[in-house]
Amino acid sequence: IEDGEIFGLVGESGSGKTTCGRLIVKLEEAQGGKIVLDGTDITGLRGKDLKAYRRKVQMIFQDPYQSLNPQISIFESVSEPLIIHGEGGSSERQDRVLSTLRAVGLSPPEDFIYRYPHQLSGGQRQRVAIARAVVLRPEVVVADEPTSMLDASYSAQIYNILLEMRDRFHVTILFITHNLAAARYLCDRVAVIYKGCLMELDRADEVIQNPKHPYT
């Protein structure tokens, strides 16, 4: 995946898309091969090195109902990564949380920081999840089907937020989806995965207009 691009990973349910994303953020351990970031093999990282890697690579999960803790406020959810990684004092953290919530379209952010997940719509919850992923200004974000729980109009808003995050924070995004239309709209390049293997990889328009593999 090239620096600064949105790279689509497209395939049916069970094809290995989410497993790939979980391997990259090290929620799963690889049984073989290498995962390399900026020339460094990260497959065996432990301790401080793993914590430093986690600061650079974040994930937006598919289901904001499950990925946000229902017992803590929006402010606590989004500020938690900053606390874990020792970023700034309390006033700096509050400023970062407010500016990030504003960037993902939760405005004015002061209206949201003391709410809890059950007090938000599904689209608003997913915006919170995006804010939590980008608040550390990571190098890479894995977005695992971030709109599969949302209707079409909210999905389009989330796609535009991801595009803006890429441009504003120069973040590289792995966008995991089973929706070819979404991949075409968002992604610079697309890889098609089937039963754990890549069938083809090319520019998004090329994959969709001139598919090389029957599965595509």
Image: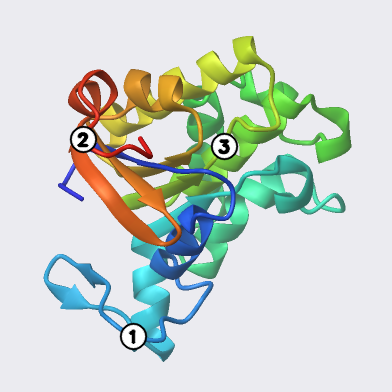
Mark 2 closeness class: few <14, some 14–19, many ≥20 residues within 10 Å: some
| Residue that appears at 88% across and 36% down | 118
Closer to us: 29 or 204: 204
Of the numbered discs in the image, which one, if any, rests on residue 135? none
Closer to us: 1 or 78: 1
Vertical placement of 40 versus 155: above or below? below
In this rendering, position of residue 116 left or right of residue 129? right
| Residue that appears at 22% across and 37% down | 5
How far, Cα to Cα, is label 1 from label 2?
28 Å
Mark 3 closeness class: few <14, some 14–19, many ≥20 residues within 10 Å: many
* Residue type highlighted by circle 1: Gly
How far, Cα to Cα, is label 3 from label 1?
28 Å
Q: Earlier in the sequence, mark 1 or mark 2?
A: 1
Residue 195 x, y percent position in the rendering? 45, 59
| Number of marks in picture | 3
Closer to us: 169 or 6: 6
Q: Of the residues tagged 3 and 1, which is closer to the observer?
A: 1
Figure quadrant of residue 44? bottom left
| Residue that appears at 41% across and 86% down | 31
* Residue type highlighted by circle 3: Pro
Vertical placement of 144 versus 30: above or below? above
- Taking the image as drawn, is residue 88 in sight? no
Residue 80 x, y percent position in the rendering? 61, 58
Task: State the residue position of label 3.
Answer: 146
Task: State the residue position of label 1.
Answer: 32
* Residue type highlighted by circle 2: Lys
